[in-house]
Each structure stands twice: as structure tokens, then as C-alpha cells.
Amino acid sequence: MSNLRVGLFGPGAVTVDGQPVKLKPLTMTVLIRLIVADGLPVTVDELYRDCWPSTELVIGEYKTQVQKRILEIRRAVDPGWSSDSRQGSTVLPAERGRITAYRLVADREAIDVFQFIELAAQARRVVPEDGIGLFEQAIGLWTGPPLRAVTDKPWADALVRKLNGLRRSAGAELAHAYERVGRIHDALDLAEELAATTPEDTGLTDWVETLRRQVRAGQDTRTCRADFADLKATVVVTTGDLFAQDDANLVVGFCDTFDTDTDRNIIISGESAQGMLLRTLYGGDRRKLDRELKAALTRVPKVFVESRSAKPRGKLTRYPVGTVATLYHATRRVFAVAYSQMGNDLMAQSTLPVLRLSLDSLWDAVFRHGQLKPVAIPLIGSSLSRTGARHEELLTMIVESFLADLRRRYLGPELRVVLPLPLFDQIDVSEVLKVVRDSDREAPERV
């Protein structure tokens, strides 16, 4: 059998083994009638009644006319076909009692309208993020109105209605999936297209306005998300200000000495997360921050106390790497996690194993003190801690460690990784979340 492809979006097109095939209009109509039957037999009488512009021929004449069109289809779509060998034919006779009937034998994926239906069904069987590509592929098949060559035929109405309805619902689901992963502009473009075709849908009109407000409010915002339904949690990677995440507990990275002095950027950079914490939440009151850190570290065993001669600047007491000091600030917590070692030369150093150990300690503190609130965290390990890791590695580690702990115990509904816009644009965030999500599916079930 030849490699047949039939396109019924738009004017209609047939290719065999990649080469276009020209069919006469009436012959194309007969082919489409067989396609619409979806593998069921269609009698000679039905084909003549449904496809011919005039049905005035006597019985012997119209059977000859139908058989002639069937022969044209066979020769066009099966170049090797002959009357002596019908086994591989695409159009087979199907006897219905004494009445001759024909049916089309073809892979549904070879016919674009059926391929569209199947892709949309597949997209609905997976999580919204995974369905995006399938919905995009399905909608991409629409190169024009469905079954345009036979829109005047009543037998085409049901399939046309089904396809148009499925196109609208698939478009709406794709737009919602875009919104969930932070592709607001894409969601708005698609929602506006849908609203233009269904102006009576007030719910859709309201949603378009909501998306427009989101676009206006976040022109420079990027967001990607991944839902983990079995863990009852969501991972969101977004751009913005860590300290503006008012609904979430915050994570701020520190070194093992919990230094806070940002004066002249000699010990701690004023632009680091520690510096931003001091300036934003403590109004620059370093003594207050130091008092709260000291209180949080009271029961933590000290590793070592440096001499002032060995460490001329900054704090002298060292705590175990991975120590988490929980600070209470208004209605949220700040988890100050030590994931690097401050050298006596004031150079912080860390490694990926140390960072992973620190993350494990962090989630333990979140479990004990987080009160099940969302957790907002920067890309710790990405700058002055000098881990030497790529940004994708760090993001993957943060998300995977959160999910690994979440399989053991519930930490809260959301992990929110907050990145500066330039850093977000350097990372293929969607791909990182896809890889993590695929890996999570293979992980042992939560107990």
C-alpha cells in the first residue's frame, strides 16, 4: 500500500509517497464521503445520492459512474493496484447483502482531521504543561476551514461541527495551559482569537480582560510553572523581587559565620541577598538583624571561633555548613541557610555536595517552622559562593531536593524560585522543569 496522506483542512489535498495527486472534483467528493464514514461501508446508492449533483440516472448507469470514480481513487492512491490483487488496496469492496458497498482502509493518522482529533485527545490525557506541545501540533494542522470542498453536503455537517467545536475547546485549553506556565502573551493572543469568533461568550471576554491586565502589570515578568498533583504542590520559577513575595516565607543564603556587614561591600555585598535582607526587611538596622540571628543560633553547636588576627574583619564564630537560622518577620519566616564557608580572606566558597546538604537542612526547617506557607528562594549558589556550577544545575538541584523531601512529608503548596530577569533569560527554565517533572514521575511513590 502506498504512503497516503489526505488533508481536509482547507480546499483538500492528497499526496502519495510525498507527491501531490490531482483528483477531479467529483472524485475528491467521493473520497471525502468514504473518509467521513470512518471505515464503515458506504453503498453505491449512498455514494451516488450523496456525491452527484444530479441523481437522475437509471440504476445501471449510476452504478457504472460510481465504480468509475472508485477506480480513479484506487489508481491514484494505490499506483500498484490491479483488479487481480485487491489485498493491499486502500478502497475495498464491502458486500452488504446483495448491495455493493465500499469502505476506505487507511491509517487515521494519514488523514489530518482524524489526526487533529487524536492529538487533542492525547493532550487532554496528560498534565497541562505536557499537553501544550500536543495542542500546538493539533491546532497547527488547521490550514483552513474543515472539509471546505464539501461544505454544501449535509453528510459533512456532523464532522464539521465536531471539528469546529473541538478546535474552540482545544484553543481554550491551550490558552489556559499557556497561562499556567506563565506564557501570558501567548495566552492572550489565543484568547483574543477565540473571543473574536464567539463574542457572545461573556466569560471568555472577561478572561481576555484579565489577561490584558496581567500583561500590562507585568511587561517585564517571566514565569514558568510545573504542577505535581500527586504531591499537592507546584514549582514556580519567576522573575521579580524576592522580598516582595509577601505571601511566602523567604530563603536567604548566608556563609558559615553569618556575616551581615555590608559597609563598603568589603565583607558582604550590599547587592547580595543578605544585603537586600538587611536593607529591605530590617531598614539597614544591622544590630537588630545580628541579635535575631544570634537568638536563632543559640542552641546550634559552634564549629570553631577564629582569632581576630586570623580573621581581621567580620564575625569570628563558625557554625556547621547547612545550619538554618529561622527569623520571624511579621507574618512570615526568613530561613537563613549557611551553604558556604567564609574564608579568612573574606572569599566565600561552596560546592554542589555542600549545597545539597544545606538544602536538605533547609527543608527540615521549613517543615518545622514554615506553617505550610509557600517558600520563595533565590538561585542560591549562583554568584559569590563560587560553586562553579551552571545555573541550570543549581535550579535543577533546588527543585529536585524540594520534591525529594516532599515525597517524605508535606512542606507546603508551592516552591517559588525568584530570579533576576537577565538570569531567567539565560536559563531554559521550561526545559529544566520538564526534565525535573519527567524524572519525578519515575521516582518512588510518596509514602
Image (cartoon, helix red, strand yellow):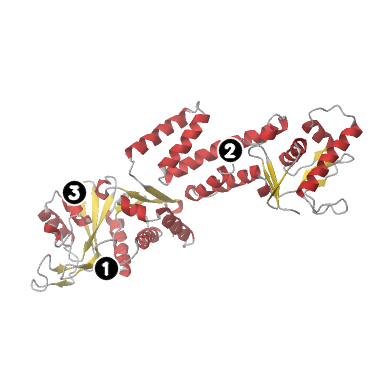
Distance from Cα at disc 1 to Cα at disc 3: 26 Å
User: As rendered, which of 6 and 36 lies closer to the eye?
Assistant: 6
Q: Are marks 1 and 3 in contact (CB under 8 Å)?
A: no
Tag count in the figure? Answer: 3
Residue at disc 2, secondary structure: helix
- Residue 65, image quadrant: top right
Residue positioned 18% across, 72% down in the render: 303
Badge 3 marks a residue whose secondary structure is: helix
Instruction: Tell me where residue 188 sits by quadrant.
Output: top left
Q: Which percent across, then down, holds residue 37? A: 74, 40
Residue tagged 1 = 350
The kind of residue tagged 3 is: Thr
How crowded pointer 2 is (Cα within 10 Å; few <14, some 14-19, many 20+) is rated as some
User: Quick check: 147 left or right of 276?
Assistant: right
Residue at image x 28%, y 59%? 365
- Residue 412 showing in the rendered view: no
Earlier-in-chain disc, 1 versus 2 = 2
Q: Is residue 261 above or below residue 141?
A: below
Q: Earlier in the sequence, mark 1 or mark 3?
A: 3
Q: Say whether disc 2 or disc 3 marks the residue closer to the N-terminus.
A: 2
**Distance from label 2 to label 3 (Cα)?**
50 Å
* Residue corresponding to mark 2: 166
Q: Which residue is mark 3?
A: 280
Q: In the rendered structure, which amino acid carries the disc numbered 1?
A: Ser
